[in-house]
Amino acid sequence: MKVLITGATGLVGEELVAQCHTKGYAVNYLTTSKDKLVSEDNYKGFYWNPSKYEIDHSCLNDVSIIINLAGTSISKRWTSAYKKKVLQSRVDSLQTLYRAIEENPNHTISSIISASAIGIYPNSLSDLYTEDEEVIDDSFLGDVVSVWEEKANRFNNLGLQVAKVRIGLVLSAKGGALPEMAKPIKYYAGAAFGSGEQWQSWIHISDLASMFLFIAENELTGIFNGVAPNPVTNNKLIKELAKVLERPLILPNIPEFVMKVLLGEMSYLLFASQRVSCKKIEEEGFIFNYQNVCSALKEIYENSVVERSAEDKLNKEFVS
């Protein structure tokens, strides 16, 4: 199987590429940076510029599955200009892929699996959301995800099967939100946000990449929640993170108004509550390696310590 991945050099993309290679799958990838182009037997890069609808059509050669992870990060201050960039990056990426496939009628692509986000679900402390939920969160995120998924659905018009993975909080020591959450805790300044009762539906990065491949291998279609089986409150997540980092939590929870002053509208990310179910993908036979946040955090930080120790050893040997 040959997979075309957009966003392959990002946090989730790098893990996905690694798992593809472990399984013996060849990977074509699209990048907006010509400096990141690599050409190997099982890993080949192609340039694209979605903002101008430019793409190297040869990226589609012999590809059977597209996994779309492209999109500007939402973790920057939400100015009007940046909000437009967040939405447009997702729309343009899918539109560029759509045009490329449409203009290559002899392509071999059978399906596209697109990233999405649980931000589409309404903010609630009590509800448990499944993929059947029809109400969309009345927020910038809700609007973005709604348009994002609508653009992905259009690939049905080209005869492709379409699946969407609504991703929750991705846990990884290599990037994303977790290192930023861990930083103040390491310096004895960690605390939960607001009441701390808001739900956070998380997933270990390894399980998320495995889920994309599981969907591809089993030719699944529709919406799937990319979250682990046991969501936790913000209070619980911060406490477990402090425990694995061996740091005390001595400060009171941070009031919402403080983060609004610091981050503006983007502070919504810290206080929105979505308790999301993964039952649908489990019923298809997917098995999570990390079902509770304690084991996920322990694995992440134990591995990062081992990796740092190995790097330090190599550096010492090199210097000597």
Image: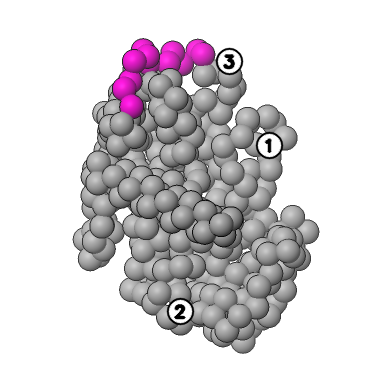
Residue 3 magenta: no
Going by the numbered disc 2, the residue's amino acid type is: Tyr
Q: For numbered disc 1, what is the local secondary structure?
A: helix
Q: Residue at x 52, y 25 (%)?
A: 267
Q: Dot 2 lies on which element?
A: loop
Is label 1 in contact with label 2 (beta carbons under 8 Å)? Answer: no
Name the residue at 50% across, 13% down: 257
Q: Nearer the viewer, residue 92 or 304?
A: 304
Name the amino acid, label 1.
Tyr
Is residue 275 shown above or below 150? above
- Image spot of residue 16 (x, y percent): 46, 64
Q: Within 10 Å of the Cα at label 3, are there few (<14), some (14-19), or many (20+) other Cα atoms? A: few
* Residue 109 disc label: none
Categorize mark 2 by other alpha carbons within 10 Å: few (<14), some (14-19), many (20+): some
* Residue 151 figure quarter: bottom right
Residue denoted by label 2: 25
At x 51%, y 79%, the residue is: 26
**In this figure, what is the number of numbered marks?**
3
Residue 233 spot, x, y in % from top left: 29, 30
- The local secondary structure at tag 3 comes to helix
Label 3 close to label 1 by CB (< 8 Å): no
Which residue is pictured at 40% across the width and 21% down the height? 188
Any part of residue 113 in sight:
no
In the drawing, what numbered circle is on residue 82? 1
Badge 1 crowding class, 10 Å Cα cut-off, few under 14, some 14 to 19, many 20 or more, is some
- Give the labeled residue for mark 3: 261
- Residue bounds of the magenta highlight: 247-258
Q: Where's residue 148, x and y in %?
A: 55, 51
